[in-house]
Image: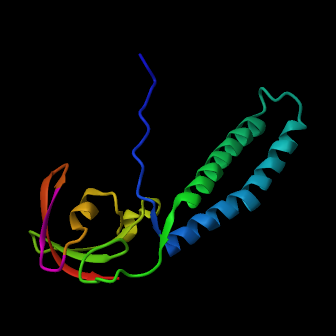
Amino acid sequence: MSRYRPPPSKSSPYITAAGARRLEEELKHLWKVERPRVTAAVHEAAKNGDRSENGDYIYGKKRLREIDRRVRYLSKRLDELVVVDQSPDNTDQIFFGAKVTLEDDDGVTHCYRIVGADEIDTTNDLISIDSPLARALLKRSVDEEVSVSAPGGKNRYLIVGISY
């Protein structure tokens, strides 16, 4: 039995200016604040002697690995991201960064903003440009109907509004 897992598919390299700022702030916080604090705690724990049974040392080293992994990821990701900070020329169609208002078959309205994969936040209705819904919406206009396959079946939406 193999442990091989195919690499995940690459997400779109687009991000909003606000999303890029948040990632840069996270990277700066991890590198300048969090990592030095954890390093100092590990250093103090190492002074206590036997490291094999020292929980502060073991968990501190684990946290350092997590921080280093995230810092490495953010550094690489920020280098390859394309910041989209202006509206497209044709604001009548849906593109990256659009705020889209949809109406489902039951007459319930939903409002989503299409953002990059690093900015997804379903509680604030931010959906990834790589999501099935966003892909179905791209290059569509107001009063067009879209159909999206979901785990519960197909959902149909009417595009009610577009803004940037």
In the rendered image, the residue lying farthest to the left is: 105
Whether the magenta-drawn stretch holds residue 143 is answered as yes
Q: Magenta span covers which residues?
A: 141-148
Q: Quadrant of the N terminus?
A: top left
Instruction: Give the image location of residue 39, x and y in percent.
Output: 80, 48
- Expressed as whole percent of the image width and height from the top left, the position of residue 114 reads 34, 69
> Which residue shows up at 19% across the image and 53% down it?
150
Give the residue drawn at x 28%, y 64%.
Answer: 134
Report the number of numbered marks: 0
Q: Position of residue 98 (x, y in %)?
A: 33, 76
Q: Is residue 72 left or right of residue 101?
A: right
Q: Residue 66 placed where, x, y %?
A: 64, 45
- Name the residue rendered at 37%, 63% in the picture: 122
- Asked if the magenta segment contains residue 103, the reply would be no
Between 61 and 19, the residue placed more toward the observer is: 19
Residue 34 as seen in the image, left or right of residue 120? right
Location of residue 99 with respect to 125 vertically, above or below: below
51 to 142, vertically: above or below: above
Tell me the quarter of the image containing the C terminus: bottom left
